[in-house]
Amino acid sequence: MRLAEKRNLLVPEIREVMDIRQASDYLGISPDTLYKYASEGFVPAFKLGNRWRFKRSRLDEWMDQQSNRNAADAALSPESSDRKPVRSAL
């Protein structure tokens, strides 16, 4: 087996549409936390049947927005960077 083929066996495939386990691995959080976030509408997700699904591109956009928002908050209030980010009420 060629080296390139061996490397592909070690790297998990990241699909555009992920289930809750794949998305939680991608985001680095537990599946239970991601399920809670999806149910609350905090992360972009959709249901296919009765299962949550997550588009990688939408998660990437969401993370960029969160990062930009947190950076703007830190610039306005340097002491706020020590606190845990809180989702704003709707």
Image: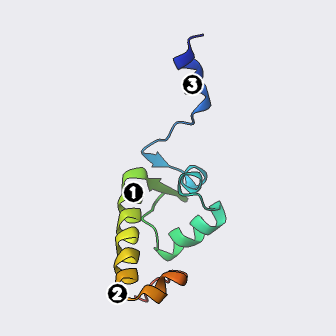
Return the disc, 1 or 2, that comes first in the chain's sequence: 1
- Closer mark to the observer between disc 3 and disc 2: 2
Return the disc, 3 or 2, that comes first in the chain's sequence: 3
The residue where tag 1 is placed is 60
Q: Dot 2: what SS? A: helix
Q: Quadrant of the N terminus?
A: top right
**Residue 51, horizontal then vertical, whole percent:** 55, 57
Image: 20 above or below 78: above
Residue 76: numbered disc: 2
Residue 33 quadrant: bottom right
**Residue 13, horizontal then vertical, whole percent:** 52, 36
Image: 73 above or below 59: below
Alpha carbons under labels 1 and 2: distance apart:
25 Å
Viewer-closest of 1 and 89: 1
Scheme by which the image is coloured: rainbow
Residue 7: numbered disc: 3
**Residue 36, horizontal then vertical, whole percent:** 58, 72
Q: Could you tell me the amino acid type at mark 2?
A: Leu
Q: Could you tell me the amino acid type at mark 1?
A: Asp
Classify mark 1: residues with Cα within 10 Å, few (<14), some (14-19) or many (20+): few
